[in-house]
Image (cartoon, grey):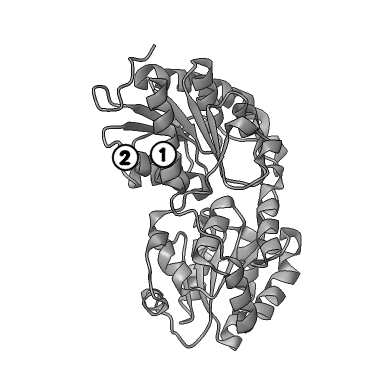
Amino acid sequence: MNDKLNLSGSKPLHIIIAGGGTGGHIFPAVAIARALQKKLPEIKFLFVGAKGKMEMEKIPEAGFEIQGINIAGYNRSALLKNWSLPFKLLQSYFDVKKIFNQFRPDAVIGVGGYSSFPVLREAQARSIPTFIHESNSFAGKSNILLGKKATRIFVASNGMERFFPKEKITITGNPVRSIFSENISKEIALEFFGLTIEQPVVLVIGGSLGAQSINEVIQSNLSIFDKNKWQLIWQTGKNFSGPAAAEESERKNIWTNAFINKMEMAYSAADVVIARSGAMTVAELSMTKKPSILVPYPHAAEDHQTANAKQMVDMGAAILVPDSRVKEALMPALSSLINNRNKLAEMAASLNKPAAIKADDYIADEILNFLKDKN
């Protein structure tokens, strides 16, 4: 049993934040932790992630401690790879019990990803308050199961009562990285990438891990970029960084890297964005008011990326290209947009909803107020 909490400081609050796998889970987690830390500096955090996933690198870079557990998700694209899943799940529960016994959390926050399920399940079994942030407009099965016993569920959009108990839902939007509150001129951003103000700029971001289908189409059509004097900022992911770097060495109109650490520069430089439609990408596009061509990841759980993309299309802010048609449809979609200044302006203007810059603060307040009232 945990000691009685005193949010004024006699006992530091211990909070576990679980989840990861992609930037769409990691960046909100870090934003929430920093908002909590700002309000209560003495909080002690422990992140829990999946061994071998990008959170094991990105969370320490953000200045937080993380412990990895041996877990993986269900592989929808290669079913034979799932044979070891039951063993990993069992091992993860032993890992989580050990972490809880050592760290003794007062609350647990789940942001999605493989590691969040066993961690929140253990917290609920111990009657420790659990908070869920569901970033997508179509909730994942794990979060739906966990939501039944969750203390509070923070969501990004309306209509989530079809997945969660209505009385537990709070609409907060998605926490985005604090960098997007900065005002960076297009000229400064273009200079950062070594590009020119005279030609239009396409930003390609296949998510934090890259997107093979999008990368292949871009590579095979670089001659069109050359012919039309389009410029390209291309986040490739690790697996495609080599071929892209080889293309960059032969051209002055493209910039490539496996991962863009200065995304505020990339968005400021871009006229059109080609991307997957993960929840955080959609939130960032909305905040930066960038017209986009969205290619939903076809193996996302419950096809939630298509649901995210359709919301943007319905607003008039994006064009949706299914991954199955990306080879024949992506470049025509880009050609129809990039030189149509009126259309680009209309799409940007459709993103006139206030961005959820303070979602992280709102979530932090809700968590701390609950813990204060409880104790």
Q: Nearer the viewer, residue 168 or 208?
A: 168
Amino acid of disc 2: Lys
Amino acid of disc 1: Ala
Name the residue: 60% across, 83% down.
Answer: 341
**In the picture, which quadrant includes the C terminus?**
top left
Mark 2, residue position: 39
User: Where 161 sits versus 173, above or below?
Assistant: above
Name the residue: 71% across, 43% down.
Answer: 302
* Left-right relation of 113 to 178: right
Q: Nearer the viewer, residue 198 or 225?
A: 198
Q: Residue furthest front?
A: 373
Q: Residue furthest left?
A: 10
Q: What is the x, y in percent for residue 33?
A: 38, 40
Mark 1, residue position: 364
Answer whether residue 54 is visible to the viewer in this image.
no
Q: What is the x, y in percent for residue 144?
A: 65, 32
| Secondary structure beneath label 1 | helix
Q: Are marks 1 and 2 in contact (CB under 8 Å)?
A: yes
Name the residue: 62% across, 56% down.
Answer: 277
Q: What is the x, y in percent for residue 48?
A: 44, 32
User: Where 209 sits versus 249, above or below?
Assistant: above
Q: Nearer the viewer, residue 94 or 64?
A: 64
Q: Nearer the viewer, residue 176 or 297?
A: 176
Image quadrant in which you'd find residue 191: bottom left
Name the residue: 63% across, 64% down.
Answer: 214
